[in-house]
Every structure is written in C-alpha cells, then in structure tokens.
Image (cartoon, rainbow, N blue to C red):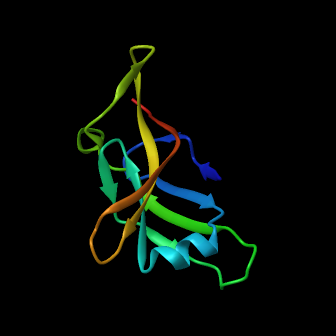
Amino acid sequence: MSWTPKEGSEGTPLTVRLRVDEESVLQAGPIQIRVVVGKKAMGTSVDRPHLGSSEDWVLETTVPRLGVADYVVPVSGVDVVAPVHVQVLNESAGEVLETVYVGDFTYWN
C-alpha cells in the first residue's frame, strides 16, 4: 500500500493505492471502500481494476477541514496530524468489515 501526499492543508487531494485480495472481496459480497481521515469518513472515489488484474486499487478523496477531522495529535506544537485509515464495509448492512491504518497526514499550519 502507498499513499500521497503525507502533508498539506484542507482540500488537498489524497490518493491511496492498495492491493486487494479478490477472493476475499468476492466472498464478502458487495462492498464499499472509503478513506477515513481522523474520525471523518470521507467520500471516496474508487478505481477498481478488472478482475484478474494485478493492478492496484486507487482511492481518491480530499483532506477535510482540521476541525472536521475530529482527532488530532500535536506535533512540535505547530503542525497537527490526523491518522488515515482505509475501511471496507459490507455495502448492504453498512457494517465495517476491516479497517487498515495507512499513516498520519500532517496538516500545515
């Protein structure tokens, strides 16, 4: 898994690339994948490759306002960071099946 950028400000486009186990996805039934910044689940564009492809899935969203992220940790008293996660949900029940920590996004002050 990779993601970029690791720092920026509100409205910064955020891209996460990840490999997905197709077999697990097919067994889970219809799913939804989203990016979470802090505690804020973001509207996420998902580019899924064709079945059988070895390409990464590409998730795209934008970084929310700092206050909306809801969870921040001070870093050196100036910048703040918010954890970034990817969540897989059962589409019909809205149940979170898996949450994967991606890294920390640093907000510029």
Image point (57%, 47%), residue name: 5
Q: Nearer the viewer, residue 13 or 82?
A: 82
Numbered marks: total: 0
Instruction: Look at the picture and state if 80 lies above or below 67.
Output: above
The percent position of residue 45, horizontal first and vertical second, equals 45, 71
Instruction: Look at the picture and state if 60 lies above or below 28.
Output: above
Q: In the displayed orientation, state which residue is furthest to the bottom.
A: 50
- Quadrant in which the C terminus is drawn: top left
Q: Nearer the viewer, residue 30 or 80?
A: 30
Asked whether, in this view, residue 56 is left or right of residue 61, the answer is: right
Asked whether, in this view, residue 53 is left or right of residue 20, the answer is: right
Q: Nearer the viewer, residue 41 or 32?
A: 32
Image point (72%, 82%), residue name: 52
Instruction: Look at the picture and state if 63 lies above or below 24.
Output: above
Image point (38%, 51%), residue name: 36
The percent position of residue 71, horizontal first and vertical second, equals 30, 34
The percent position of residue 14, horizontal first and vertical second, equals 50, 55
Quadrant of the rendered structure where residue 68 is?
top left
The percent position of residue 20, horizontal first and vertical second, equals 62, 66
Asked whether, in this view, residue 39 is left or right of residue 4, the answer is: left
Quadrant of the rendered structure where residue 96 is?
bottom left
Q: In the displayed orientation, state which residue is furthest to the front.
A: 27
Image point (54%, 79%), residue name: 26
Q: In the displayed orientation, state which residue is furthest to the right.
A: 54
